[in-house]
Structures are given as structure tokens and as C-alpha cells.
Amino acid sequence: MKTIALEEHFLIPELETYLEETFQNVNRDLAARAVPRLLDTGAGRLETMDACGLDMAVLSIAGPGVQIEPDTALAGDLARKANDVLAGIMAEHPARYGGLAHLAMQDPAGAADELERCVTDLNMQGAMVNGQTLGRYLDAPENEVFWERAAALRAPVYIHPGNPVSKPVCFEGHPGLWGPFWSWGVETGTHALRLVLAGVFERYPDARLILGHMGEGLPFMMWRFDSRLPVSYHPEPPLPEPPSFYLRRNVTCTTSGVFDDVPLRCALDGLGEDNVMYSIDYPFEASNLADEWISKADFPDRVKEKVCFRNAERILLNMTAS
Ligand code: ZN
């Protein structure tokens, strides 16, 4: 079956130093193996894609990238550079690679312009933002200009996990909790809920968010969100719909880093079968494991086709439907 994956990372040498922020959370061996793979978008990567039957990889910078750069002008320059390099890679292998724009959210208006350049002039599929930017989340009022443009362009915005600016005390004493094992999912699911509670999706019904890791736990929790919000908190201005409404309408998820039928069933039930897309998270996850799982996953072919490529062809920009 045709497969398109959209949490597949690459790197330009200029952004390598920022990876240290991520590597504090991962095994040193995995980190050392990852760097040459991230820098290779040629024969080595294409061989791996062929070996695991991956037709198309939508590439994105391995985070956090410029998200943690304190100098706004430098962050903008580096993001544009990364996007120009990515556009070149896509042009070299148009059938194999797509791209998600790297954005300097330090300057939301500049990020909106860069998003528009990337999806309009450079043929990209949307954008990826690596969590908070210098402590500011995407629901901040400063980002209104960004959401207005993203919604008008119908450009999907993928929130990739990152670290918060400070470590909550509940993660102290157990280093394993900090990172992909637990804290990244909590951080990223929280980021998405901030957008729901801030009314971003109420104001921009066409905004589209993508979450990795089967939706960062949110599909499992939807009934409870709807049940508990009215008795615990009243957003101002009020939300006319329950949280699950916005999660189903505005949020899609990928299978990145979660190769298991049980959470896929939950994501399909929770968000709907039109809102789940296949992804691996190369090079941090093993492409062969993902392929072995999705090949055997126990779902009807009609649903698997949606997950493996049809939803991506519909949701991402500048895609040709097959
Ligand atoms: Zn990733």
C-alpha cells in the first residue's frame, strides 16, 4: 500500500547546535547515530525509505531548531535558510520528498509571511513548530496574526514535542520522565489544549493542527475533557462548543513513534478515520518497525488507505491525490 509519512526529520549544519536541547532527553548512542542520518537526504535515506516501502517523506527540521534562539533576527534568517535548503531537496526528488516549513515564532508576523512563502512559492505542505518559543505558546495573543494567516492559507501546523522552559517539580528525581517517555507528550498535549481553551479554533474554524504520537493522549481523554470543563473552568470568552468538538474538527494526528493497533483504534474512534495519518519519526524511530506494524495492522483496507496516504493527500497542501 502507498505510504506517506510526515514527521520525518532532517537537518542543516547551521542548526545542529540547537539539537543539544533535544539530546538531553535521549540516549547518547541514538543521538550520535541520528546526526549523520538527519544530514543525509540522498542515497542513504532513499534506500531506507525503499527498504520499508515508504513512498514519500514530508521532511521537517529536527527540533527545536530556531525555536530556542534568543536573537529574533538570527532565528528568522536561519529559518529562511532551512526552508530554502528544504525547497532544493524537494525539487531534486519531487516524488519522494515534501516539506514542512521551519518558522521563527519569535516574530509571529514574520512567521506568517514565511509560512505563506513556503506553501505558496516553495510548494510546501504546511509548517512544523517545535513547542513553545522562548516561553511563549501558540495561543498567546501575539500569535493571532499567525493563526489568521495559517487559517486563510488552510496550512496545517504540526506541533512537535519540545521541552518547556523550566522543569516542573513532578519530573524531579526521575530523569526518565523527562523527554519522550512522558514529559514531551504532556507538554505537547497541553499546548494543544491551550489552543482549544483560548478559543483559537473558535475564531479560526479553518485552522488545522497536527499532533504526533497518536494525538499525544488527547483522543483517549475526550469524554473527560467535555465532562470536567464545565465544572472546573469557564473560558473567557466562553467556548460555545465542548473541547471534543474542536479536537475533532481542527486537530489531526499521526502515528509517529507509536506503532500499535490499540492507540490507533482509539485515535480513529476519537478523532475520526479522516484525521489520522501515518508517520515514523525518522531517524529517531526504526523505519522497519513502523513498516512491519502498519503492514500487519488489523484494520480494513479502506481505513488503512486513509491512514497511509489518502488523509495526508487531502489534509496537506500541494499534494496530488492518487
Ligand atoms: Zn519527531
Image (spheres, rainbow, N blue to C red):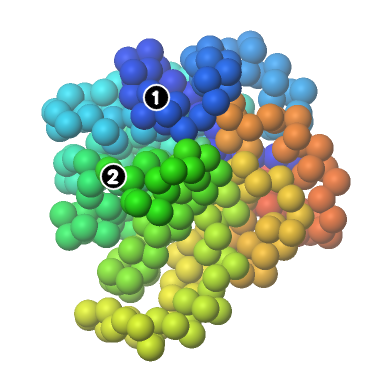
Residue 32 screen position, x and y as percent = 53, 15
Q: Nearer the viewer, residue 317 or 136?
A: 136
State the count of labels.
Answer: 2
Question: Where does the C terminus fall, quadrant-wise?
Answer: top right
Residue positioned 82% across, 58% down in the render: 299
Residue positioned 55% across, 70% down in the render: 221
Q: Residues within 10 Å of mark 2 (few under 14, many from 20)?
A: few
Any mark on residue 19, and which?
A: 1
Q: Residues within 10 Å of mark 1 (few under 14, many from 20)?
A: some
Residue 188 visible in the displayed image: no
The disc labelled 2 sits on which kind of residue?
Answer: Ser
Residue 57 screen position, x and y as percent = 59, 32
Residue 38 visible in the displayed image: yes
Residue 94 screen position, x and y as percent = 55, 26
Secondary structure of the residue carrying tag 1 is helix
Q: Ligand 1: does it lie within 8 Å of the C-beta at label 1? A: no
Residue positioned 75% across, 30% down in the render: 288
Vertical arrangement, residue 212 with respect to residue 148, above or below: above
Secondary structure of the residue carrying tag 2 is loop
The disc labelled 1 sits on which kind of residue?
Answer: Leu
From this viewpoint, which residue is outermost toward the bottom? 231
Residue 126 screen position, x and y as percent = 42, 43
Quadrant assignment, res 123:
top left
Residue picked out by circle 2: 166
Vertical arrangement, residue 177 with respect to residue 87, above or below: below
Any mark on residue 37, and which?
A: none
